[in-house]
Image (cartoon, coloured by chain):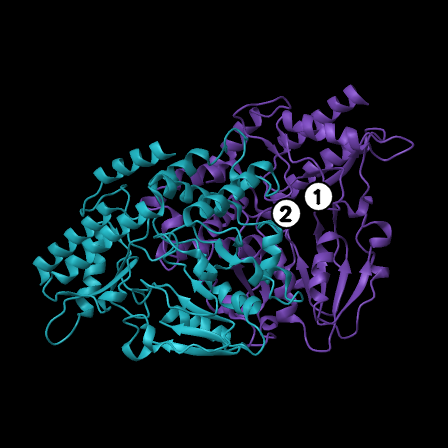
Chain colours: A cyan, B purple
Amino acid sequence: MSTTASGTTAAAATNSSATPRAGKRAHNFNAGPAALPLAVLERIREELIDYRGTGMSVMEMSHRSPEFEAINNAAEQNLRKLLAIPEDYAVIFVQGGGSMQFTMAPMNLALPGKPVDVLHTGAWTAKAISELKKGTLHTIAATTEPVKFTRVPNAGEIKLSADASYTYLCTNNTIEGTQYHALPATAAPLVADMSSDICSRPLDVSRFGLIFAGAQKNLGPSGVTVVIVRKDLAERADKNLPTLLQYRTHIKEKSLYHTPPTFAVYILSLVTEWMAAEGGLPGIQKRNEAKAKLLYDAIDASGGYYHCPVEKASRSLMNVVFRVGGSSSQPGDENLEKEFGKQAAAAGLVGTPGHRSVGGMRASLYNAVSVEDVQALVSFMKEFQRAKG
Amino acid sequence: MSTTASGTTAAAATNSSATPRAGKRAHNFNAGPAALPLAVLERIREELIDYRGTGMSVMEMSHRSPEFEAINNAAEQNLRKLLAIPEDYAVIFVQGGGSMQFTMAPMNLALPGKPVDVLHTGAWTAKAISELKKGTLHTIAATTEPVKFTRVPNAGEIKLSADASYTYLCTNNTIEGTQYHALPATAAPLVADMSSDICSRPLDVSRFGLIFAGAQKNLGPSGVTVVIVRKDLAERADKNLPTLLQYRTHIKEKSLYHTPPTFAVYILSLVTEWMAAEGGLPGIQKRNEAKAKLLYDAIDASGGYYHCPVEKASRSLMNVVFRVGGSSSQPGDENLEKEFGKQAAAAGLVGTPGHRSVGGMRASLYNAVSVEDVQALVSFMKEFQRAKG
């Protein structure tokens, strides 16, 4: 697939511009579900009705067929290679998204009388806390709410429990545009919501007890969730829990206890194959850093017209949030922001409005977003400022 | 789409034969995931990279975009029309398959001190019972285990509780090949696992309190589950349950509380559109009855060489189970059955081996399986008997 992937990426690049482009690929900055590599979409299309001579779509194959078992194994093995996942960790595919993990993680890993330490950094950790409040002992070990979640916590402000079940964090905060660039040191296992930055850069999995990620940002379509869990921790769970909500069920059956979301797993296998062909996570990281630098530099060089509220050390490489029309009296202008979103969409730049809960703008720069997409956005921003600023 | 659908069905029919057909569509008798209408697959392929001029795949679109909201609404409205679902019922799309409903249904609908009455008819009700055993008061109101699940219960053998929370049944038993052709009369609401016969025939939804179905048999790909629930019953649930496991969460947010499996919902919208164009459920039922008759007649006319263990009044129109190589001394011959499965696959007839737990053969005749597919199977069976019988 590597030849196809490179060829297609080059072809896609020639289509890139900030002008309206009927029938052309959009510059897709959606926060998730989000852009997928064109080479992967082309491969899906090619195999859609007849998967490699089987006379069937992947969607029509039994999940117990040798063909699907090969796909399921490839998805797991591709992830294991990309992330160098140690042998004592299981990799499983489940349903329900990150939101289901807000329930499953404490249900399986919280020990009686030992609190879950939470690092609270925004809307997604707030959702996790809501589920903990339904009966799991927990403490807020740090919160950046007083600074409006414009950064992740500093090492000095994290107050860990002596006997925590685990420490919970969200490595990248999609809505607030913050990301950890160093992990906090903890004695308890780290449990991480990595939905929006998994596979965006190399990772030391051995620092974690459990990592979960909805696929719909960097790994594939929505409908499949990756869980990487240290096998011994999965054994903490009460065997009387609902079967489907025990990690051990999926570990034991290699994600085939019940019918998996087969097509989503297939696409995940293709996206992870594409990542390997793109230089693996070091290659992906290099491109992600270049993309983020392009955009943050453009914001910082705008003389305050564009403004990123996030502290520099916590800026996310995945989700760049910014305001438009800043002046000495205000950081941004809501009317100009609406106009920005509309004009950008008309120019083929999709998904730039910020999350409905916070407003402003947001450009998500997941792995499948190209340098050319970001260049198109930066050109549009300069033109918009020239016309309106 | 109706023109395309008919045109394609006709075209597919000319490809039908029981000879090996490299690159041709398989005759797909898989039990689920299962055959999808070719017209639907072609439409998916056509729209895969650029959904109706958006420059994106459906997989790449935000679930909060107007385009996806239209898809989500279409999926719901199509189901409402096909099944004539009353206004006081909600239709929601969730994740986790039927297996998750084994947990969610009692979690939401069981009332303290009021048992769940279960009609036990095979492997799938057994799984539901396993989850009930984890803490929900329940009774086995009937079981056909003593007759090896070769039929569904008769009205006379069902012993209902006076104060049941609900009566639970599986309307079609995929593994055992049985199906209810009349519903039991109960005072308590009926809760039905309809995964393998939903939308196979018209249905009086008002007889039910809750219906659930994994999509991967008659409605689409795996990864999305349809729940039809009487709204007042969804209000029974404790608000302290995990948010994602409460039906009311998904009802209130129209299945968009969290990121749904967008591509699977899109395909469900296309499959339900295809069903409407095929004459709605009356048209679908007529074809399903014709298909099942073709196959059961062939079995019954084989002089005992083929043998269906299911009592005639309980025979499933969806999953036809049968043995091969029957004689006066035994109902079937395992070696011949292995040979049958292999030769059938070589002839392009996929998915005929029975479930691994029961053996024998099984042909699943879901909506997207054509009369021509069944004719090809019957021809193959005659030829196999002639050669081996």
Measured along the vertical axis of the image, is residue A208 above or below residue B332? below
Mark 1, residue position: B317
* Horizontal side, residue A311 vs residue B362: left or right: left
- The quarter holding residue B12 reads top right
Q: Chain of mark 2?
A: B
User: Which residue does the image show at 50% across and 33% down from the upper left?
Assistant: A51
User: Which residue does the image show at 18% across and 46% down from the upper left?
Assistant: A19
* Horizontal side, residue B180 vs residue A190: left or right: right
* Callout 1: SS: loop
* Callout 2: SS: loop
The reply to whether the C-beta atoms of the residues labelled 1 and 2 are less than 8 Å apart is yes
Q: Chain of mark 1?
A: B
Q: Residues within 10 Å of mark 1 (few under 14, many from 20)?
A: many
Mark 2, residue position: B200
Q: Type of residue at label 1?
A: Leu
> Horizontal and vertical percent for residue A79?
45, 47
User: Which residue does the image show at 8% across and 58% down from the upper left?
Assistant: A387
* Horizontal side, residue B138 vs residue A112: left or right: right
- Residue under disc 1 on the same chain as residue under disc 2: yes
| Residue A170 circle label | none
Q: Type of residue at label 2?
A: Ser
Measured along the vertical axis of the image, is residue A84 above or below residue A330? above
> Horizontal and vertical percent for residue A277?
36, 39
